[in-house]
Amino acid sequence: MDIITTREYCLTKAKTEESLPFDDQTLVLKVAGKMFAIIALDGEPCIALKCDPELAVTLRETYPAVLPGYHLNKTHWNTVLLNDTIPDATLQEWIDHSYELVKAALPKKVRETLESNE
């Protein structure tokens, strides 16, 4: 997936908002104000995704395009190079996983609001 397709897929997730809070080259996607994806708009195309810590290590060991989260907590974040070595369906699963992890950590009342509006 390229940057545009990746961004468009992220925006299909319920109540997703996008912004450029750091600079004009770092797109942040959030649910209820919490980041679940960060897309670099300059340099090598990549996306940072939140990930279960054990799965994060497995993915890094399995896929050369998956690296520890750049400038992020490397236990909970992976950076995935968008270089066409990861099948689109697999990358979409990882985006879904990141979104669900962030959503699950939200307060119950916020989660219920999101789920009632999906």
Image: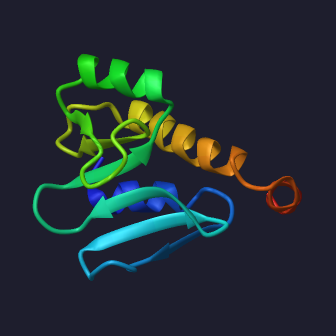
The count of marks equals 0
Foreground of the two, 46 or 110:
110
Name the residue: 88% across, 59% down.
109
Residue 16 screen position, x and y as percent: 60, 65
Query: Is residue 59 positioned above or below 102 on the image?
Result: above
Where is residue 75, by image quadrant?
Answer: top left
Classify 23 as above or below 96: below
The answer to whether residue 64 is above or below residue 21 is above
Task: Tell which of 97 and 67 is nearer to you.
Answer: 67
Horizontal side of 46 relative to 7 (left or right) equals left
Q: Is residue 91 left or right of residue 29?
A: left
In x, y percent, where is residue 59?
34, 23
Give me the residue at 43% from left, 33% from top.
89
Residue 67 in picture, x, y percent from top left: 23, 36
Residue at 26 percent across and 82 percent down: it is 24
Q: Is residue 28 above or below residue 59?
A: below
Which residue is located at x 44 percent, y 56 percent? 37
Model colouring: rainbow
| Left or right: 32, with 117 as reference point | left
Q: Position of residue 28 (x, y in %)?
A: 42, 68
